[in-house]
Amino acid sequence: MKETRLTLPQLALIAGTRVVLGGGIGLLIADRLNDRERKMAGWALFVGGMISTIPLGRMVLSRRHAKGECREGKARAAR
């Protein structure tokens, strides 16, 4: 099993990109703005969410370790 350790700011950044992505999708399907405004805002949020997801996803995947490996590495460094 893999374990990933993230700091609170990293987790907040990941959650923020999900909000932006969801907001973009919501605007694309909403009827509150006129058609042109809605599509422009929706696509801008959607693309921004997707673009910011790529580096964050790479960061999370690079921090994955086999379960227990993180603790063993810290124990070795303390010696």
Image (spheres, rainbow, N blue to C red):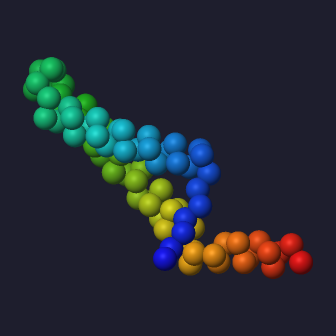
Q: Nearer the viewer, residue 30 or 38?
A: 30
- Measuring from the top left, give residue 68's x and y in whole percent: 63, 76
- Measuring from the top left, give residue 26's x and y in whole percent: 21, 35
Residue at 35% of width from left, 38% of height from top? 20
Residue at 44% of width from left, 40% of height from top? 16
Give residue 21's quadrant in the image.
top left
Q: Is residue 38 left or right of residue 12?
A: left
Q: Is residue 48 left or right of residue 13?
A: left
Q: Is residue 30 left or right of residue 54?
A: left
Q: Is residue 51 left or right of residue 66?
A: left
Q: Let me know if residue 62 appears in the view.
A: no
Q: Which quadrant does the C terminus fall into?
A: bottom right
- Measuring from the top left, give residue 53's x and y in whole percent: 40, 53
For residue 16, above or below residue 73: above
For residue 66, above or below residue 52: below
Residue at 59% of width from left, 61% of height from top? 5
Give residue 30's quadrant in the image.
top left
Q: Let me know if residue 33 appears in the view.
A: yes
Q: Nearer the viewer, residue 26 or 36?
A: 26
Q: Nearer the viewer, residue 48 or 23?
A: 23
- Measuring from the top left, give residue 15's x and y in whole percent: 44, 44
For residue 24, above or below residue 55: above
